[in-house]
């Protein structure tokens, strides 16, 4: 039996942002990847924006994604820890995934140590200085009174509105900075002056990157996305690698 020793990280699936055919195709690719790592994974961190929009009513959730959710449930049942970090597109996740699947939900940063290395895992939005307007909007959207008020809207209207808000957010945050990683790297370097972190793992920026930080050994890794790149990170206890899940031509033909 293969020893479960790997920790995997992935983010920004954005399921639901495009038409049903493309979302279903992307979901199947993600499920194939999860099945492939099933026997080696001891933990999987989903680092935000798994869904392009999400809101849990008391008795209702957005339809779809049954292949992904079923696969995650099977992984949890087999002993794999699944961690879900809220992103800016799925910040209104509450307890459904914890209660029905057994996932561990993180409102913000997840920090842990493994094999003597310190990990800082965060979706990557609104960290450190800067982005004041975005942080204001983020704080409003996370307000519990606003969330309870939104829950009074009928799901047929509420989820349609969520989709429109998600599209507007995506358009507003189409970064045209010279370096979209400037803010998280600055935040990481500043935090290193206060505490030890070996690996900063983030999403949100949609550009996979692996950079050594100012102290010469800590690393900032951005997970990229599964919209165009299918990139993820694997930690085996000794080495941290930024990888891409590649489909064979036959697999791609089957899914098109």
Image (cartoon, helix red, strand yellow):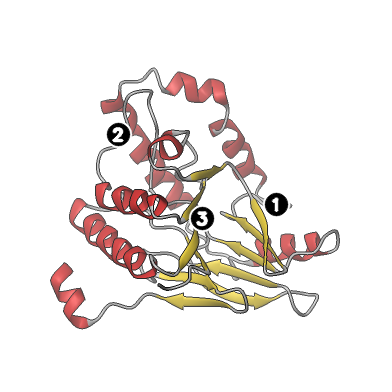
Density class for disc 1 (Cα within 10 Å; few <14, some 14-19, many ≥20) is few
* Callout 3: SS: loop
Density class for disc 3 (Cα within 10 Å; few <14, some 14-19, many ≥20) is many
**Rounded to the nearest whole Å, what is the CA distance between mark 3 and mark 1?**
21 Å
Q: Nearer the viewer, residue 199 or 43?
A: 43
Looking at the image, residue 104 sits to the left or right of residue 21; the answer is right
Looking at the image, tell me whether mark 3 or mark 2 is earlier in sequence order.
3
**Mark nearer the viewer, 3 or 2:** 3
Which residue shows up at 31% across the image and 54% down it? 71
**Rounded to the nearest whole Å, what is the CA distance between mark 2 and mark 1?**
31 Å
The N terminus - image quarter? bottom left
Q: Residue furthest front?
A: 1
Which residue shows up at 67% across the image and 57% down it? 112
Density class for disc 2 (Cα within 10 Å; few <14, some 14-19, many ≥20) is few
**Mark nearer the viewer, 2 or 1:** 2
Looking at the image, residue 125 sits to the left or right of residue 56; the answer is right
Looking at the image, tell me whether mark 3 or mark 1 is earlier in sequence order.
3
Residue assigned mark 1: 130
Looking at the image, residue 98 sits to the left or right of residue 132; the answer is left
* Callout 1: SS: loop
> In the rendered view, would you say 166 is above or below 8?
above
Callout 2–callout 1 Cβ contact below 8 Å:
no
Q: Position of residue 26 (x, y in %)?
A: 28, 61
Residue assigned mark 2: 160
Residue assigned mark 3: 47
- Image quarter of residue 144: top right
Callout 3–callout 1 Cβ contact below 8 Å:
no
Q: Position of residue 17 (x, y in %)?
A: 32, 51
Q: Nearer the viewer, residue 18 or 113?
A: 113
Q: Position of residue 110 (x, y in %)?
A: 63, 51
């Amino acid at each position: 039996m293969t020893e479960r020793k790997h920790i995997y990280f992935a983010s920004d699936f954005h399921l639901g942002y495009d038409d049903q055919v493309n979302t279903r195709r992307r979901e199947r690719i993600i499920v194939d990847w999860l099945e492939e790592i099933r026997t080696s994974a001891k933990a999987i961190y989903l680092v935000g924006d798994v869904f392009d929009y999400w809101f849990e009513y008391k008795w209702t959730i957005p339809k779809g994604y049954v292949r992904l959710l079923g696969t995650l449930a099977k992984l949890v049942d087999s002993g794999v820890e699944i961690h879900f970090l809220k992103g800016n597109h799925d910040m209104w996740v509450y307890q459904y995934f914890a209660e029905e699947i057994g996932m561990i939900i993180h409102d913000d940063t997840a920090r842990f140590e493994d094999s003597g290395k310190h990990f800082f895992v965060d979706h990557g939005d609104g960290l450190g200085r800067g982005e004041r307007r975005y942080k204001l909007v983020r704080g409003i959207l996370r307000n519990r009174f606003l969330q309870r008020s939104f829950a009074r809207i009928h799901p047929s209207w509420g989820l349609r509105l969520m989709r429109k808000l998600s599209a507007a957010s995506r358009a507003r945050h189409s970064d045209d900075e010279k370096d979209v990683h400037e803010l998280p790297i600055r935040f990481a370097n500043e935090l290193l002056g206060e505490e030890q972190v070996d690996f900063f793992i983030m999403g949100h920026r949609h550009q996979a990157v692996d950079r050594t930080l100012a102290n010469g050994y800590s690393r900032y890794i951005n997970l990229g996305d599964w919209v165009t790149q299918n990139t993820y990170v694997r930690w085996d206890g000794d080495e941290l690698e930024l990888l891409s899940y590649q489909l064979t031509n036959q697999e791609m033909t089957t899914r098109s």
